[in-house]
Image (cartoon, rainbow, N blue to C red):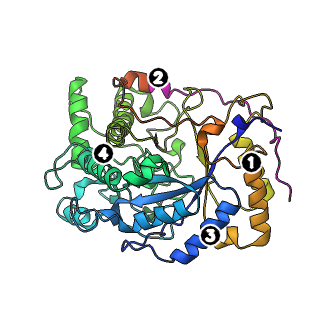
Amino acid sequence: MANILNYVPVYVMLPLGVVTAKNVFENQDEIRRQLYKLEEAKVDGVMVDVWWGIIESRGPKQYEWGAYRSLFQLVEECGLKVQAIMSFHQCGGNVGDVVYIPLPQWVLDLGESNPDIFYTNRRGTRNKEYLTFGVDNEPLFQGRTAVQIYRDYMKSFRENMSDFLDKCVIIDIEVGLGPAGELRYPSYPQNQGWNFPGIGEFQCYDKYLREDFKKAAADAQHAEWDFPEDAGQYNDRPDGTGFFRNNGTYVTERGKLFLTWYSNKLLLHGDQILEEANKAFCGCKVNIAAKVLSASWRENIDAAGENALPRYDPNAYNQILLNARPNGANRGGAPKLKMYGMTYLRLCGQLVDNDYNFRIFKMFMRKMHADQEYHQNPEDYGKHIYPLELSKSKISTEDLLEATKPMGPFPFNSETDMTVEG
């Protein structure tokens, strides 16, 4: 049997609309029944979106947490842990979204008079999934900046969920940083006509990001430079554009200045929001997480994963097991590489009410736990959660860019050593 340090916890994502757009926790008896099925399968916990568009919908700083408190009480009753997502984006418009939860109406109303608070492409089309990074530090929202809005929301969450935090029912806070909660631009929106494998488009044409770039260009002694005009449209291919083709504009001094500015805005946004999250939850025994593309294992940072699409067959589970422990289990101690945790998409009747699917899922859970018994205390399998401390000195942009340089892939075994059999 493998060592307990090979144990990978699994958190099942709750339905997107478990709390409705009208801030109601509906179908509580059905959710209770399904949660107890997860407990039967020895699932470690659940992950749930805590939507800004629901909680602060009535007006600035008018937070309504009652429905989520009822949900967390039920999760605690079922013996499960909670990973809570601070979801500052719109629900709807991404792959798998079957629920529509917009940004708070008072924010959308402001966008009617000032549409530049939203991401904008070259043709002036607005994207209302998430506020543009350009307003992060602009006091446009009744005197508050976007960063201050996110800060106040997280502080209110801590104040209103302090009992669940103190009892370690809530163990992880994932901070949404962009569309679909990910640290990225909304470069490939399906509702604007994008289709795979189109290259997408730059989303920086709101007036605030335009002004920021003009300043960056002037600081570089090139005040005459503007955004690229040869980067193509959503469904172009790289070699069909002047910017991305081989030896295209992107390798010129002008192209490099733009791309450096564009990517740095992303890094600075993530850094600011995570710093506010760190302050909001300082002293709590929680981990702060974010969805980013990163070389986490190289930098010795815990990395978690999730399945992109719902699958219930052994082949899919075996691929997840291989990803969770790429070099297999270690009977003598911790494996060489191991995911911090895995999010399973998603809780539904097809998972827990189909006898075959549920039987295979329980087998999958056993293998993710390295054939160990279920452990409610994460410290048993080496996942120590300490009271959160304030951040250390700020990391320079240069160091961040160095850490994101491409690297070779980690070696993976050809198949998992802990298989789920059908």
Residue 411 covered by magenta stretch: yes
- Estimate the spatial distance between the alpha carbons at disc 3 and disc 4, rounded to whole Å: 39 Å
Dot 3 amino acid type: Gln
* Local crowd size for mark 2, using a 10 Å CA cut-off: few (<14), some (14–19), many (≥20): few
Residue 283 covered by magenta stretch: no
- Estimate the spatial distance between the alpha carbons at disc 1 and disc 2, rounded to whole Å: 41 Å
- Estimate the spatial distance between the alpha carbons at disc 1 and disc 3, rounded to whole Å: 21 Å
The magenta region covers: 401-421
- Mark 4 or 1: in front is 1
Work out whether mark 4 precedes mark 1 in sequence or the reverse, and give the earlier one. Answer: 4
Give the quarter of the figure containing the C terminus: bottom right
* Local crowd size for mark 1, using a 10 Å CA cut-off: few (<14), some (14–19), many (≥20): few
Give the quarter of the figure containing the N terminus: top right
What residue appears at the point 67 percent right and 43 percent down from the top-left corner?
A: 8
Label count reads 4
Residue position marked by numbered label 2 in the rendering: 402
Place residue 79 in its image quadrant: bottom right
The one nearer the camera, 140 or 366, is 366
Residue position marked by numbered label 1 in the rendering: 373
* Local crowd size for mark 3, using a 10 Å CA cut-off: few (<14), some (14–19), many (≥20): some
Residue position marked by numbered label 4 in the rendering: 133
Work out whether mark 1 precedes mark 2 in sequence or the reverse, and give the earlier one. Answer: 1
Work out whether mark 2 precedes mark 4 in sequence or the reverse, and give the earlier one. Answer: 4
Dot 4 amino acid type: Phe
What residue appears at the point 18 percent right and 58 percent down from the top-left corner?
A: 114
